Amino acid sequence: MDTNTQPDAMELIRLADSVQSVSVRLRSTTPTAESLGVRYYDAEAVVTSGFVNGTVHLGFDSEDLTDWSRLLEAIAGAEQEGGPVEPVRADWPRAGSSAYLRFITEDPYVVEVHDGPSTQIVVSVPLDMGEEWIAESSERLAAVRAVLGE
């Protein structure tokens, strides 16, 4: 763990197979700011693979937690129907002022980590995720929401 990550940090997203992973971990469960009822958090996207390992700052707000929940529900619904005709493509958090993930439900699933506002580097990580990843992601999201009071 890097020295800037607080002891109360926790993982919000973990997408992994047996070889590589992409995760988003909160740097702290304390909001960095709050405006009009929206809380802002500092996090970091972490890519781990045999080819590249890296970490990039990622900021999100309390509304982005709802967006992540909706994305998980959309993918779960598409998978129950036998898979989407068109791959689901979504950015989380919304592309803008910090790094973000682009999730693409192809075979294999692909997660792109975009450092758009800074270096403009994109790392694409194909993942062979198991059947339980949506349930595990939903449980992780519920745990983070509980700790954040969202």
Image: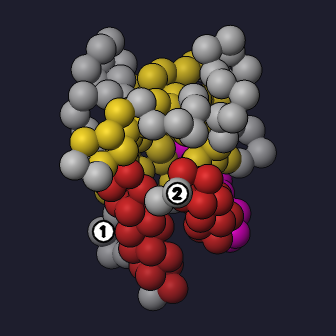
As drawn, the label of residue 149 is: 2
Who is closer to the viewer here, 87 or 12?
12
Residue 22 shows in the view: no
The residue under label 2 is which amino acid type? Answer: Gly
> What residue occupies the far right of the structure in this picture?
18
Secondary structure of the residue carrying tag 1 is loop
* Crowd rating for badge 2 (residues with CA inside 10 Å; few <14, some 14–19, many 20+): few
At horizontal 53% and vertical 36% (from top left) the residue drawn is 30
Provide the residue span drawn in magenta.
126-133
- Determine whether 30 is above or below 65 in the image: above
Name the front one of labels 1 and 2.
Answer: 2
Whether residue 129 appears in magenta in the rendering, the answer is: yes
Q: Residue at x 38, y 51 (%)?
A: 62
Which quadrant holds residue 47?
A: top right
Q: Is residue 49 above or below residue 141?
A: above
Helix, strand or loop under label 2: loop
Query: Percent position (x, y) of residue 70?
Result: 38, 69
Quarter of the figure with the N terminus: top right
Q: Residue at x 33, y 55 (%)?
A: 63
* Name of the residue lying farthest toward the bottom: 81
Quadrant in the picture for residue 66: bottom left
Q: Which residue is mark 1?
A: 86
Mark carried by residue 150: none
Q: Amino acid at mark 1?
A: Glu
Query: Camera-side residue: 12 or 135?
Result: 12
* Left or right: 110, with 46 as reference point: left
